[in-house]
Image (cartoon, grey):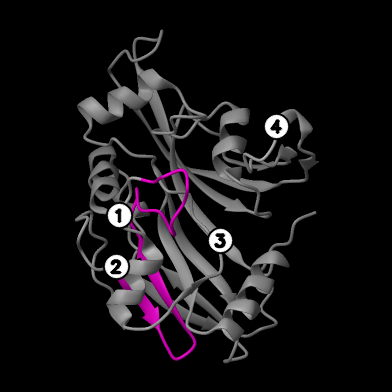
Amino acid sequence: MPATPPSQDACAPLPILYRDAALVVVAKPSGLLVHRSALARGETRFMVQTLRDQLGQRVYPVHRLDRPTSGVMVFALSPEVATQLAQAFTQQQIAKRYLAVVRGVGPDAERLDYPLREEDGSRPKAQMPAMPAATEIRRLDSVELPVQVDRYPSSRYSLIEARPLSGRRHQIRRHLSQRGYPIIGDAKHGKGNHNRFFKERLDCPRLLLAAVELRFPHPLEGRQLQVSAPLQEDMQQLFERFGWAAHLPQHDIAWHDTDSPTFATAP
């Protein structure tokens, strides 16, 4: 099924990347909450309700993306399928690929293996146990701009591919920040001066992190379904401006045998 380009219109329907009798895969826009939250009482639009009204049936989220993160999300169309898919996520049977724009020139390839404390807001971080977390990263490209944003006369940024091998909250954002390459637009783990530069000079006021590919075992087909999504327009324009157009992901659907050795598991 062809996808419509991801839209930033607050009232636009969600782009459908794939749909069958069991599930639907959509492209989440940056800034949209997945479901209602006590922390966002003033919000009136949420993915679950929007998709339910768009499809005319109930939908069941089985994983999450942070509010500022855009990209591929899968929803079950029945409680039974939701249970199966949620188990696949819990058991690390999912392969995820993200693209992030970060400050600095990142490493060619590296595994970030930093334990992370859970951030559920129910108790102080110091009381939360540190859980194992691993993310594989790879620098795809970089750019140097003749603009002084920090203390240097020029500013360097990189395009990073990130593949999380575990599912901790804000894992990619926290891992890249700990490694010294904060994601642009990350208000919590990034650097304000670089965030402001992208917002005011490059028309990118958002977190530059996108889930561009998701691969998971289809609960009915007995095969793995892989769905890729294009970037939102603002990130697409930035890639073209930086000369990174060759790295722009496209909408794609592929099926793989269940024994295909592509799933990564947490250590």
Is 19 included in the stretch rendered in magenta?
A: yes
Q: Which residues are magenta?
A: 15-41
In three-dimensional space, the C-alpha distance between marks 2 and 4, rounded to whole angstroms, equals 35 Å
Please provide percent x and percent y for residue 208.
38, 41
Question: Which amino acid type is shown beneath numbered disc 3?
Answer: Lys
Tell which of 33 and 102 is nearer to you. 33
Distance between mark 3 and mark 2 Cα atoms: 20 Å
Identify the secondary structure beneath mark 1. Answer: loop
The residue identified by callout 4 is: 125
Question: Mark 1 packing: few (<14 Cα in 10 Å), some, or many (20+)?
Answer: few
**Residue 96's disc number:** 3
Please rate how many residues cluster around mark 4, counting C-alpha atoms within 10 Å: few if below 14, some from 14 to 19, many from 20.
few
Q: Quadrant of residue 120?
A: top right
- Answer left or right for 195 relative to 265: left
Q: Residue at x 45, y 66 (%)?
A: 73
Judge depth for marks 3 and 4 and give the one in front.
Answer: 4
Q: Nearer the viewer, residue 34 or 256?
A: 34
Residue drawn at 67 percent across, 55 percent down: 165
Locate the C terminus by quadrant: bottom right
| Chain-order first, disc 3 or disc 4 | 3
Mark 1 belongs to which amino acid? Thr
Residue 2 at x, y = what percent?
28, 79
Q: What residue did someone put label 1 on?
A: 44
